[in-house]
Image (tube, helix red, strand yellow):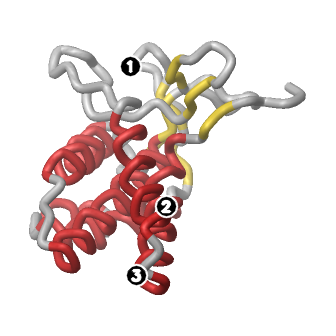
């Protein structure tokens, strides 16, 4: 698909992390605002209805033409990306922690969103112990297990920041 016009929401927390670090270095308020706006926008991509089988997952894209969040990538690898959700949870928590430490501001909604994401990821574990690359719109239909590098790196960080040992053990 040519000119795929989306905001890739799954990477937004990483962008916010670097924006906030830039704010730390420069003191320029534009970086602070960008970090906060990015995370507040990204939260809108999350499934927040507990009755939803995808409760906690984030849609990986915001389609700028249709003005909707979805996980319909421009490749054959579309639907809910477990690895990218892990990645988002990690950096969402890292920004939450840094803002709390530096400013004394507890953006609890960021923390809670990250925990919902991490819990959703853990529920996706395949019987062989691995994680699927994608979860179809039918929550019972998952891909085979793959090396989930972002998840392996994210869960020890998620465990350390939340203090919840389940997350730390999950990547082992």
The kind of secondary structure element at disc 2 is helix
- Front residue (pair 8, 81): 8
Asked if residue 42 lies left or right of residue 73, the reply is left
The kind of secondary structure element at disc 1 is loop
Whichever of labels 1 and 3 marks the residue nearer the N terminus, that label is 3
Q: Label 2 to label 1, Cα distance in Å?
A: 29 Å
- Label pair 1/3, CB-CB below 8 angstroms: no
- Label pair 2/1, CB-CB below 8 angstroms: no
Residue under label 3: 24
Q: Which mark is residue 140?
A: 1
Q: Residues within 10 Å of mark 3 (few under 14, many from 20)?
A: some
Residue under label 2: 14
- Figure check: 115 above or below 97: above
- Front residue (pair 135, 2): 2
Q: Residue at x 18, y 45 (%)?
A: 109
The N terminus: image quadrant: top right
Measured as percent of width and height from the top left, residue 34 is found at 47, 56
Kindly report which numbered mark, 2 or 3, lies closer to the viewer in this rendering. Answer: 3
Measured as percent of width and height from the top left, residue 118 is found at 27, 49
Measured as percent of width and height from the top left, residue 61 is found at 57, 32
Whichever of labels 2 and 3 marks the residue nearer the N terminus, that label is 2
Q: Label 2 to label 3, Cα distance in Å?
A: 15 Å
Kindly report which numbered mark, 1 or 3, lies closer to the viewer in this rendering. Answer: 3
């Amino acid at each position: 698909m040519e000119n795929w016009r989306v905001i890739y929401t799954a990477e937004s927390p990483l962008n916010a992390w670097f924006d906030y670090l830039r704010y730390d270095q420069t003191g320029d308020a534009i970086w602070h605002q960008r970090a906060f706006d990015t995370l507040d926008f990204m939260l809108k991509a999350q499934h927040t209805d507990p009755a939803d089988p995808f409760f906690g997952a984030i849609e990986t894209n915001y389609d700028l033409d249709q003005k909707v969040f979805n996980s319909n990538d421009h490749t054959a690898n579309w639907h809910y990306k477990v690895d990218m959700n892990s990645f988002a949870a990690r950096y969402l928590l890292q920004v939450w922690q840094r803002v709390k430490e530096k400013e004394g501001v507890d953006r609890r909604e960021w923390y809670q969103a990250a925990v919902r994401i991490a819990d959703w990821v853990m529920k996706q574990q395949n019987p062989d112990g691995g994680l699927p690359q994608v979860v179809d719109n039918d929550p019972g239909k998952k891909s085979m297990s793959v090396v989930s590098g972002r998840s392996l790196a994210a869960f020890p960080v998620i465990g350390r920041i939340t203090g919840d040992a389940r997350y730390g053990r999950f990547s082992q």
